[in-house]
Image (cartoon, rainbow, N blue to C red):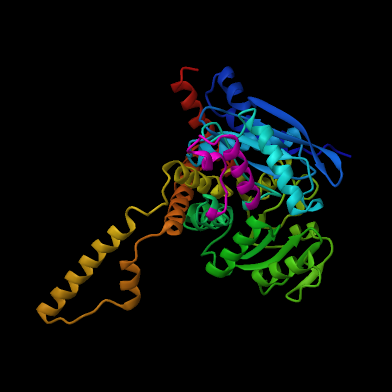
Amino acid sequence: MAHRTSFRESVEKMFNHAAGLMDLSPGLEEKIRVCNSTYTVRFGVRLRGQIHTFTGYRSVHSEHMEPVKGGIRYSLDVNQDEVEALAALMTYKCALVEVPFGGSKGGLCIDPRAWNEDELERITRRFTYELSRRNLISPSQNVPAPDMGTGEREMAWMADAYKRLHPDDINAKACVTGKPKTAGGIDGRVEATGRGVQYALREFFRHDDVMKRANLEGTLSGKRVIVQGLGNVGYHAAQFLSAEDKCLVTCVIERDGAILNPQGINIDALRGHIRATGGVKGFAGGDYHENGLAMLEQECDILIPAAVESVINSDNADRIKTKLIIEAANGPVTADADAILRSKGIVIIPDMYANAGGVTVSYFEWVKNLSQISLGRLERRHEEARARMLVEELERLSADTGLNWTLSKGFKEGFLTGADELELVRSGLDDTMRESFMKMKEVWMNNARVDDMRTAAYVVSIRRISNVYNSLGL
């Protein structure tokens, strides 16, 4: 059997390809590429009458910016190679979207479904202790976030555990992001990565020249979409695209199979079915297919892999029949598959851009925690008062001049309402996705040696990181 490129090998191949197109000294290129450190922790927790030993990792890829940032995943598949590759991807992702973090990543080798809530909390708090004593969780040095197998609940436990260990740290809430709103979180964080996927696609469809590269035209409305993985990211991306942009989500692929409906799937109904039954089998809103991964090869306009790494690889890449792939997951397309897909004219919106919504809104949450104030709290009512003054003056002038016109109710209400935290978060995320896309597009369209968007993203990221190192005298 031929060797299949691993996730880590894919990240390194893609980095090396982009770096080879740039004028970097060998020493600087190596400094940007290598992972600075990886810590392995093993700790015991007494559960169910006996001590269970768990293995966790925290990798720091680059400290050109601090703190370093990256999620923590709970999965039996967690290993050092995966964590280091994800940390590297975080470095490049943060540089691309210009959030002031270095790259990090963590994981705990555990099946979270095998433990009840109380047991998971005890495990998480002990893991936090092990990270804290090594300065691997800190508002100023290393800031974890949710990832596969973790969420708001785990982040709240970690934040509370850190605060108990550091009661004099006024910025303790900023030690992790992705927390519940009641524990210092921010509106819009849960759906941030899925919303970022939507904004990335909207920006792609604003540019005729990039759409032409994918043999697409028109708008998102009516475009056939396949989503692989209906977890947090896949669900929100599918729901926003179908409900707000009128895409047709024709197929959803999950662990136990896939649902196919050419007329479009009701995403909320399917999610409710998955929660009730544990899988897609038996869902009445489409045809069930047991071999879910084979459905990646169904014809569509947009394919959204939103689950795990390497689902599109050298074994199935030549059978993929889509025009555009947007990588909502980290590393769903291997380096070998990437080359095959590009040879077929398929355009790929790379993971380091496509799923950057999570780290972008995490940045907003971190800033909120450090400033100790909600976004918009100082200016919202002031904006409303100024808008009301303008409306009242226009209405007075209308009455004085005998025009007697009035503003429509919908416009007036919208104009007189100041932006709340959620609206500001969405605005900031939308701006980030637009600006980052334009930087990639500039390199992609104007550099004859750069023939795909992924390479363009790496070039932008590596250039920004090298500029930081050069300014530091390295």
* Quarter assignment of residue 454: top right
Report whether 317 appears left or right of 173. right
Does 50 appear in magenta?
A: no
Q: Quadrant of the N terminus?
A: top right
Give 190 or 230, whichever is nearer the viewer.
Answer: 190
Report whether 417 appears left or right of 284. left
* Quarter assignment of residue 191: bottom right
Asked if residue 253 is positioned above or below residue 460 in the image, the reply reads below
Q: Is residue 452 visible?
A: no
Give 228 or 127, whichever is nearer the viewer.
Answer: 127
Q: Position of residue 373 (x, y in %)?
A: 41, 48
Which residue occupies 81% across, 68% down? Answer: 281
Magenta-colored segment: predominant secondary structure = helix
Does 177 appear in magenta?
A: yes
Give 67 or 220, whichever is nearer the viewer.
Answer: 67
Q: Position of residue 375 (x, y in %)?
A: 41, 52
Magenta part of the protein: which range? 153-182
| Count of number-bearing discs | 0
Report whether 56 appears left or right of 88. right
Q: Position of residue 305 (x, y in %)?
A: 68, 53
Q: Is residue 268 visible?
A: yes
Asked if residue 187 is positioned above or below residue 84 in the image, the reply reads below
Q: Position of residue 222 (x, y in %)?
A: 58, 69
Which residue occupies 68% across, 57% down? Answer: 231
Report whether 13 appears left or right of 359. right
Give 252 or 387, whichever is nearer the viewer.
Answer: 387
Asked if residue 416 is positioned above or below residue 9 in the image, the reply reads below
Residue at the far left: name it. 400
